[in-house]
Image (tube, rainbow, N blue to C red):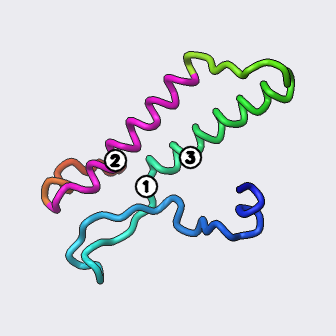
Amino acid sequence: MFWKLIAGAIVLDQLLEGDIPNSIGTDGYSSYTGAGRVQDLLITLFAASSCLLQVINNPRGFPTAPNALLEALAGSQALYLGGKAQAMLPGRSRDFLKWEAT
């Protein structure tokens, strides 16, 4: 699978983009880059690299994840799923809950 990623057989063009219902879009949806997807990807890569480093340092032992790392992964997934749920709401409800930095 790693080789397919490097060779380009697995397309990652829109990895960080999500769809939201939108009457203006050509198919009823429009895409956006989700902050939840970005932070979820980053924390997942951090957790995977932590486990990989443990395996490199001790190949005979099973890697252990600290509780803080598991809590960070759980929080990251919760934020991602919350953003996904918000994106699925119809127009006015979604806009009411939308938070924008000023």
What type is the residue that disc 2 sits on? Gly
Q: Which residues are magenta?
A: 69-91
Q: Which residue is mark 1?
A: 34
Q: Which residue is mark 3?
A: 41
Give the mark, 1 or 2, whose residue is nearer the N terminus: 1
In the picture, residue 55 is in which quadrant?
Answer: top right
Give the mark, 2 or 3, whose residue is nearer the N terminus: 3
> Judging from the image, what secondary structure is the residue with disc 3 in?
helix
What type is the residue that disc 1 sits on? Gly
Residue 76 in magenta stretch: yes
Q: x and y percent of residue 39 in the render?
A: 52, 44
Label 2 crowd (10 A; few <14 / some 14-19 / many >=20)? some
* Residue nearest the observer in this picture, 2 or 47: 2
Q: In which quadrant of the rendered image does the N terminus lie?
A: bottom right
Q: Which residue is mark 2?
A: 83
Q: Seen in the image, is 60 located left or right of residue 8?
A: right
Q: CA distance from mark 1 to mark 3?
A: 11 Å
